[in-house]
């Protein structure tokens, strides 16, 4: 996935309001001089976000939550730094958007909470969730425009998007941009 249209193709046709929210997040990656809130985006979509203690090595997970508007919540490792949490929330939103069968409330997607069991990883789904996160942050020319705006400085780019410098370096390679 390289642009929002790729994500939109994976959504049900009747999700016009959702498309609008995702487009606005991508378009307004910065609000009031700081990176736009990924928590606000998730909550607009109906997915609650909580900071919790997770098993070592787990950054976040999508869990059933009967009190959330959508029936799902994202739990992020509270000991992570804020910049890593932002990407984690977008990654878990990727699972919610393109992997979750919302037509079956009793479905048991593989990326949902497994309690104390070992993590289950489906490599393709993990890559796709990362692609969604990348696209929401950097797609549709957002990274290329910010690269020019920040004069190619990866630290400034990281601050601009509210993510780690390593994430910026990965995104620059993915989108074929030089810094």
Image: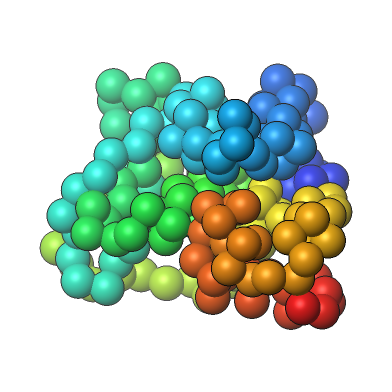
In the depicted structure, whether residue 55 falls above or below residue 101: below
Q: Nearer the viewer, residue 139 or 11?
A: 139
Total number of numbered labels?
0
Instruction: Name the image quarter holding the C terminus.
Output: bottom right
Residue 12 vs 178, above or below: the answer is above
Give the percent coordinates (x, y) of residue 152.
Answer: 75, 70
Q: Choose between 57 and 24: the one closer to the eye.
A: 24
Tell me which residue sits at (37%, 53%) in the image: 82
Left or right: where does residue 31 sit relative to residue 149?
Answer: left
Q: Is residue 177 left or right of residue 126?
A: right
The percent position of residue 72, horizontal first and vertical second, equals: 38, 34
From the top left corner, tell me how far across and down residue 49 is, in percent.
35, 37
Residue at the image position 67 percent from the left and 48 percent from the top: 136
Q: Is residue 39 visible?
A: yes
Q: Specify the color scheme.
A: rainbow
The quadrant in which residue 64 appears is top left
The residue positioned 79% from the left and 46% from the top of the image is 4
Give the image quarter of residue 111.
Answer: bottom left
Q: Is residue 100 shown to the viewer in this render? A: no
In front of the other: 168 or 113: 168
Please name the residue shown 23% across and 53% down the image. Answer: 78
- Report the quarter where the N terminus lies: bottom right
Q: Residue furthest front?
A: 151
């Amino acid at each position: 996935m390289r642009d929002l249209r790729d994500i939109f193709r994976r959504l049900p046709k009747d999700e016009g309001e959702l498309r609008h929210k995702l487009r606005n997040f991508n378009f307004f990656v910065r609000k009031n001089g700081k990176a736009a809130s990924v928590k606000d985006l998730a909550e607009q979509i109906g997915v609650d976000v909580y900071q919790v203690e997770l098993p070592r090595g787990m950054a976040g997970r999508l869990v059933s939550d009967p009190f959330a508007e959508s029936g799902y919540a994202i739990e992020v490792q509270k000991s992570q730094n804020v910049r890593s949490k932002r990407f984690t929330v977008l990654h878990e939103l990727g699972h919610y958007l393109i992997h979750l069968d919302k037509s079956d409330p009793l479905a048991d997607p593989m990326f949902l909470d497994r309690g104390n069991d070992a993590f289950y990883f489906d490599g393709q789904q993990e890559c796709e969730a990362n692609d969604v996160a990348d696209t929401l942050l950097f797609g549709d020319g957002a990274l290329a425009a910010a690269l020019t705006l920040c004069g190619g400085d990866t630290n400034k780019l990281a601050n601009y998007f509210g993510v780690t410098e390593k994430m910026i370096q990965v995104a620059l390679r993915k989108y074929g941009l030089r810094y």
